[in-house]
Amino acid sequence: MPFLLRRLAFYAVTAWAALTINFVIPRLMPGDPVQALIARFQATGQVSPEQTESLRILFGLDQDVSLWTQYWQYWAQVLGGDLGLSFTYFPTPVSEVIRQTLPWTLILVGLATLISFVIGTSAGMVAGWRRGSLIDGLLPLATFFAAVPYFWLGLIAIALFAVTFPVFPTSGGYDVGLTPGWSADFVGSAVYHGMLPALTIVVSSLAPWILGMRNMMVTVASEDYVTVAHAKGLPARRVMMSYAARNAILPSVSTLALSLGFVVGGSLVTEMVFNYPGIGLALFQSINAQDYPLMQAIFLILTLAVLAANLVADVAFVLLDPRIRRAT
Amino acid sequence: MTILGTDTAVADASPAPAAVRSPRRIGRRLLANAKVRIGLTIVAVFWLLAIVGAWLAPHDPNELSPDTLQGPSAGHWLGTTTTGQDIASQLLAGTRPVMLVAFGSGAIATVIAMVVGVAGGFLSGWAEEVLSMLTNIFLVLPAVPLMIIVASQLPQVGSWAVALVIALTGWAWGARILRAQTLSLRARDFVQAARANGESTRRIVFFEIIPNLATVIATSLVMTTLFALLAVVTLSFIGVTSLSDWNWGTVLYWAQTQQALQRGLWWWFIPPGLCIAILGMALALINFGIDEYANPRLRIGSVGAARLRRQGIRPRVGFTPVRRTAPARDPLDERRAG
Amino acid sequence: MTESPAAGPAAPLRAEALTRVYGSGALGSRHAVHAVAGVDLTLGAGEIVALVGESGSGKSTVARLLAGLERPTSGRVLLHGAEVGTLRGRAFRRYTRQVQLIFQDPFASLNPVHTVRYVLRRSLAIHRPQLRGAARDDAVRGLLERVRLTPVDRFLRAFPHELSGGQRQRVAIARALGAEPAVLLADEPVSMLDVSLRLGVLDLLRDLRDTMGIAILYITHDIASARYFADRILVMYQGQVVESGDSESVTQRPEHPYTRLLIDSAPDPERVVR
């Protein structure tokens, strides 16, 4: 099973690389801000000595310990789930902040990406199959939205649908009067608040899916096996779905996996615009507050999330492509 | 480490190298494409503004004035901010940094992509595995957060630092496509023939392989420039870059912090976004043109297809267009009958 | 095996027990394919030897091994009696000065971005660096005349896609001649050409042998053309040479059943011979 083995090795190395980048970046920057912050917290007596120690390990302030030892201590700490204390939400541990914000992002960005993939790929399929139909006209529009930054589209969406025509709320993830939980009111409010951000993500990430699928359909549609399928007298719909599209979708699936990093990163900015209580907003706040532990941890978690999504896409790929299925 | 399935998929999806010719002729053929011409014209206009914009600006972009929050007028083409600064002047002053960073980091990223991608496709053994792994890791790392974190930790974030950060996080996509193409070129007879003739590896890479990658490199350049454009504006909007340099993202940053949205000051946040959108669209158009050139099957564009449709011909790829209903009267038949 | 009189101990090119195994390795040994299994071959000065076999018989691999594009798993190659070691960098370039390879598909073996002039100038720049400027251009013209691509000016600026298959193959031959090689390995040089053009290219190759004394290894699946063109024939089957001898005896009195099959499958051996 060389394919899966190779992929697993890839995941392991990428996770290692992400953790190492996380280790290296704060050591490259001037140590003063972190030291200053720690000193400030220490002076007010808000930080226990153990917590200070953990921050020292994370940010490489232990000048007397060798880099190698620091690296091992860092690993031990991260594997133990200790990502330090957040400065912004002091003295909440970073892991707690992430636990609260990550689900919001996962659901919003995950669903929006999935919806965008499904709509875009279907539209691309039809556009490639029937050239010159109405859907072909959709492409320039989608390209326009893809050439615009997410956050600006978000601004326009708010101006239009929340300020000028107050259909949707301007910001937030749920009605502030409600307490988070699995009540119908709260879920309804969360869905209602999520509509507009999700819409902007879908609209602006549609174009690559349409384009990729359309181009592959055009290429695949002139393959001999598609012509043979037509000649056999199979219904056009069946030829399109089970012959052309099935093969044309493969690159899109692998692109989906690899572009998640871009999608996630771009849509984080959407959260800032909508003041959506996800991990993007937390990142935004951590930057403003120079909250390095939180910044680091968010980057780490996002990388791991993208890797996990890649794993799912890999499995989908194996299921779709019999050539690889056999090889595994 | 090669990702077997996805690599072949990219090779399938990207233009077949058979379509490529000498770079000079590619240039001429590309210019014949209307999309490329429109795209290049828009880019050229923005470059012109980048060069002369600072002199064209009617006001100093930092100058405060008592005319606060005015809508567009003859004195202030795009209105003023809460402190009476002229927005049109801010946009004009901001064009140069945006263009420099977008095209500069697009170029740097393309060079990195070429080195890593072509080397990764041409070398074999562990060097290839390492380069391929490096590319895949950078593809998976979330680029924007990484950029934000790196930029926010730099002590002084000028335009060039931003360009470098963007280039270092955005090269992987191009490298991947170039690698797939190089792999397919490397196995082709003309590369083998050049080797058998006695050409050195260096010459094979630079004179046999790279000219054949011209369209792929052009695509990569255009796409990374678009990525860099969106990235630099995003970074400025978030406020991690230096706010003393004007750029379109900085204008949006101030619009956002001054609640332009809630106050309905459309002239503050719409024009900067439109600038980004128009430039981005121009780059996308150029990319379309290159795509159509490299993959002629895409060339039966929607316009041609729409014309066929009007004539009752249903265009379908892989088939010769056929008239579904015969025209009521065939002039030739009439003449023959008469 | 019959040895030709020209094939002395210092024959231009000689292979001994040449073997190439693909897919071998610690894990993949079960799938090892012996593409070439112990081939002995001698190419005497000014001799044309045909290597005949079906596709997959390993004959193209022999060409690639002899050209130095691949390294044999075992066995050795001797150039003018001296063993050829590992071919890299300068050593490889020196080797290509003696041994040149012509590919089967002239549509694929010329880079679409380069003109004929560029291709030939490069070959001369590599192998005859002492020729510079105008002298090099004169040599380019000489090469084109030698492969009968005249008028020369018509072809100098041409790109490969502007030429016919036969013309392209002549350009490929001219490129090989730029090295003034002792040995020409021609891997199915005419199989991709229109039937009407094949004879012309084969006659050109024979003329090169006659005038320049170049030894030619002619690799083909067409035993009829081998009989027409070659002095000796080696028949290859599943990676091994199963029969060899001078062209007439191999085609008239084949001993190995595979050779007989090849001859019987040929549409009409007499047609090419006229």
Image (cartoon, coloured by chain):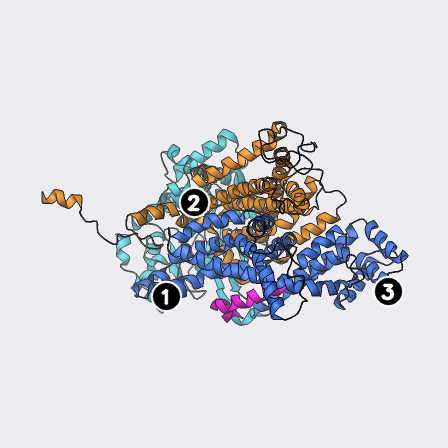
Chain colours: A blue, B orange, C cyan
Measured from the top left, where is residue C239 in percent x and y?
46, 65
Give whichever of B18, B336 is nearer the camera: B336
Distance between mark 3 and mark 1 Cα atoms: 65 Å
Q: Compared with residue C45, is residue B79 higher up or lower down, i.e. above or below?
A: above
Distance between mark 3 and mark 2 Cα atoms: 75 Å
| Image quadrant containing the N terminus of chain A | bottom right
Image side of residue B62 versus residue B71, left or right: right
Distance between mark 1 and mark 2 Cα atoms: 48 Å
Question: Closer to the N terminus: mark 3 or mark 1?
Answer: 3
- The residue beneath circle 1 is A238
Q: Given the image, what chain letter belongs to the residue carrying mark 2?
A: C
- The residue beneath circle 3 is A50
Q: Please identify the quarter of the rendering in which residue C155 is found.
A: top left
Q: How crowded is mark 2: few (under 14 residues within 10 Å), some or many (20 or more)?
A: many
Element under label 2?
A: helix
| Magenta stretch: includes residue B251 | no
- Count of labels in the image: 3
Q: Residues within 10 Å of mark 3 (few under 14, many from 20)?
A: few
Measured from the top left, where is residue B27 in percent x and y?
47, 38
Q: Compared with residue B145, is residue B273 higher up or lower down, i.e. above or below?
A: above
Identify the amino acid type marked 1.
Arg
**Secondary structure predominantly adopted by residues drawn in magenta:** helix
Identify the amino acid type marked 3.
Glu
Q: Given the image, what chain letter belongs to the residue carrying mark 1?
A: A
Which one is closest to the eye, mark 3 or mark 2? 3
**Extreme residue toward the left, this view:** B338
- The residue beneath circle 2 is C172
| Mark 3 and mark 2 residues within 8 Å of each other at the beta carbon | no
Image side of residue B37 versus residue A68, left or right: left
Q: Magenta part of the protein: which range?
A: A306-328
